[in-house]
Amino acid sequence: MIEQLRTILSAPADEDAWGYDPKFADAFQPVLDALYDRWWRITATGTEHVPASGRALIAANHAGVVPWDGAMIGTAVRRHVGREVRALVLNWAFELPWASTAIRRGGGVPGSPANARRLLGEDHLVLVFPEGAKGISKPFSERYRLERFGRGGFVEAALRTGAPIVPCAVVGSEEIHPKIADAPGVAKLLGLPYLPITPTFPLLGPLGLVPLPSRWRIEFCPPVDVSTYGPEAASDRRLVLELSDAIREQIQAKVYENLIRREGAFL
């Protein structure tokens, strides 16, 4: 435990060009394992659909106010597939001094089309959340209703690199920090895209940041092969939006299916 803490707090010694530090990731993994097994009791299905090698792009729904879903998807893939996931993270997160270093050393990369293409070109397994900040900042009353997938940038990246897209549905993250209101003025002052008010935050202070122990399900769907379209298809806006909408609809359907299978949010 002491050695793991020393590794987490020490300066990176073995990071790659993206800032990923495998020793840091290994040292922090027991925390993620405890959350995965004991706190959220996650059931992961369809992991056989995640390619064991080569480039691929995982597109998932996003929720939870604090984006623990990325870490849990990465843990599921690491356990069942034996691969590291490079998650595309909103740029503002890298402006937070207390989080940016951990995000980068854990495999997070600033989200941009150029970074997505470069990662896929290097045959990485890339995780994207097409809903963006709208997904994690939605109110609890809108839980499990996917936001629009923007302009389909993730589809463009897949088309240009020939990478398969693996749709991923996550159930459970919506309950960890139920957002009942927002504080836009304070958020703007702090340089944040939003500042949520939940039943426990800011009422309980730092304790309000502890996520609730909901039960999770993560399902990986069969890959969508876009290589037959060719790289030039990335310029076809109609095709890009059609593929983006189709993947969104598939994830939405799987979210509803897993809500039924889960039976209870906290039981």
Image (tube, rainbow, N blue to C red):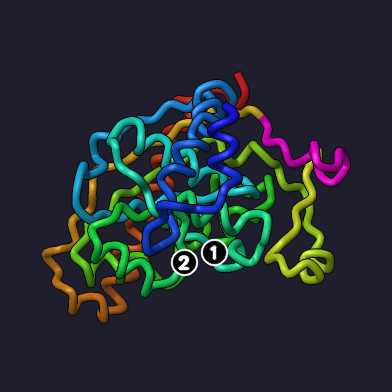
Looking at the image, which is closer to me, 217 or 13? Answer: 13
Answer with left or right where residue 101 lies relative to residue 119.
Answer: right
Q: Quadrant of residue 176?
A: top right
Q: Amino acid at mark 1?
A: Leu
Provide the residue designation for mark 1.
Answer: 90
Looking at the image, which is closer to me, 86 or 184? Answer: 86
Q: Residue furthest left?
A: 228
Q: Quadrant of residue 227?
A: bottom left
Q: Which image quarter is the C terminus in?
A: top right
Provide the residue designation for mark 2.
Answer: 111
Instruction: Assess whether residue 210 is covered by the magenta stretch.
Output: yes
The structure residue drawn at horizontal position 56% and vertical position 29%, both measured from the top left corner, is 35
Instruction: Assess whether residue 230 is covered by the magenta stretch.
Output: no
Q: Is residue 29 above or below residue 139?
A: above
Count the labels in the image: 2
Label at residue 31: none
Q: Which image quarter is the N terminus in?
A: top right
Q: CA distance from mark 1 to mark 2?
A: 5 Å
Q: Amino acid at mark 2?
A: Gly
Q: Which residues are magenta?
A: 201-212
Q: Is residue 235 above or below residue 243?
A: below
Answer with left or right where residue 199 lies relative to residue 249.
Answer: right
Which of the two labelled residues, at mark 1 and mark 2, occupies the earlier sequence position? 1
